[in-house]
Image (cartoon, rainbow, N blue to C red):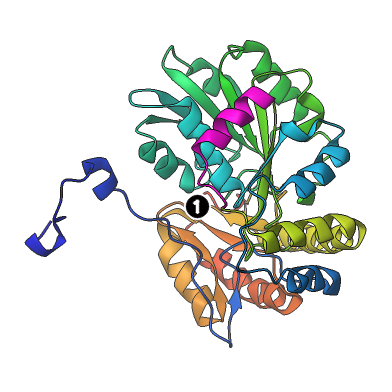
Amino acid sequence: MSLSDRPSVRLRPEIVALPAYKQGKPADASAYKLSSNENPFDPLPGVIAAVTAETAYNRYPDSSALVLREHLAAKYSIGVDQVHIGSGSVALLAQLILAAAGPDDEVLYSWRSFEAYPSLVTVAGAVSVRVPNRPDHAHDLPEMAAAISDNTRVVIVCSPNNPTGTIVTKDEFEAFMAVVPTDLLVILDEAYIEFVTQADAVNGPPLLARYPNLVVLRTFSKAYGLAGLRVGYALGPVDILNAARSTAIPLSVTAQAAAAAIASLLAEKELLDRVRVIAARRDATWQALIDQGWNIPVPQGNFLWLPTGAETTSITEALSEAGLVVRPFALEGIRISIGEEQAVATLLVMSADLVDALPVGHPARKIG
């Protein structure tokens, strides 16, 4: 660290060393942005109208987003206080970690998974415990259960997993919960749940009545197309959510975000029709890649995972030159959001040559 990089006051060294979260790379007008798992459809007119109607910018929003919580409580047949609203599900995750884990406590999760997990744990002063994904890029729940110690305070399960797209099955999750200590907070991160078509995938809300240590996270950013407004929600026991509320930055969910979320719930059928289009496009793209010779996991989010390893940078650059901005994870792989039809068509033209150029025996290339 040079003298100019050194902080002028005493700061926590682990925070100074922590890289800031980097969102997906933007794309210029001539390229397709496939780096942030955004919904490619424009907002519905009714959603835009609901946001436009919220013009009292001089007034604070309802800090608890009560009307939105009432809609969600009715949707899931739970009490209003069992719903907590935040500025995206990642904000709620940060609140829950702060509520449960402090210095020297452990937060356990699968890896690779959502890149914000390590940072959130560090900010809380806690310690990350990462359990490697299985060879098929899915969570290894038995190994995660075995890694729980007396210092573990939180376990995060991400299904579908970002960025690999794999799911945890209902049977796998219930077997995991059967051996997890009942006083250990388990967070089921379901940010991409609406895109899931695999029948045996875990579905969090129906399990809340069985597990008093479970909190389910969901968001309006992905399937509902409200990424720019930042609104997500947590479902779970009142005592746990109250603790999360105590750690929240007050008034962080705007009235415009809450209004858009309510309008989206009222237009849910039309929005989920769009989700089915994206899921079908995802499945067709995956099958085309498999037919080309790629060896990639079955995707259940609105994105694909290419385990490109050492070739990650070169393939990312090749896709960028073709007008596809994707999300690379150095020396690991590339996450590609399912976007516009033309973006998929461009990807499939490029991917045929890219897989043929991979070394024989490469994990992203099928054998034979």
Q: Is residue 121 left or right of residue 319?
A: left
Residue 17 visible here: no
Which segment is the magenta one? 238-251
Residue 117 visible here: yes
Magenta residues, dominant SS class: helix
The residue identified by callout 1 is: 362
* 83 vs 56, nearest the viewer: 56
* 194 vs 15, nearest the viewer: 15
Instruction: Answer few, some or many: residues within 10 Å of disc 1's Cα (few below 14, many 20 plus, some between 14 and 19).
Output: some
Given the image, on which type of amino acid does mark 1 rest?
A: His
Viewport quadrant of the N terminus: bottom left
In the rendered image, residue 24, in percent from the top left (x then y), is placed at 51, 65
Total count of labels: 1
Q: Is residue 229 left or right of residue 271?
A: left
Furthest-right residue in this view = 269
Furthest-left residue in this view = 3
In the rendered image, residue 321, in percent from the top left (x then y), is placed at 50, 81
In the rendered image, residue 256, in percent from the top left (x then y), is placed at 69, 64
Residue 149 shown in magenta: no
Name the residue located 53 percent from the left edge and 43 percent from the top edge: 113
Residue 185, placed above or below residue 75: above
Name the residue located 39 percent from the left edge and 27 percent from the top edge: 102
In the rendered image, residue 336, in percent from the top left (x then y), is placed at 60, 62
Residue 143, placed above or below residue 73: above
Residue 247 shown in magenta: yes
- Give the quadrant of residue 34: bottom right
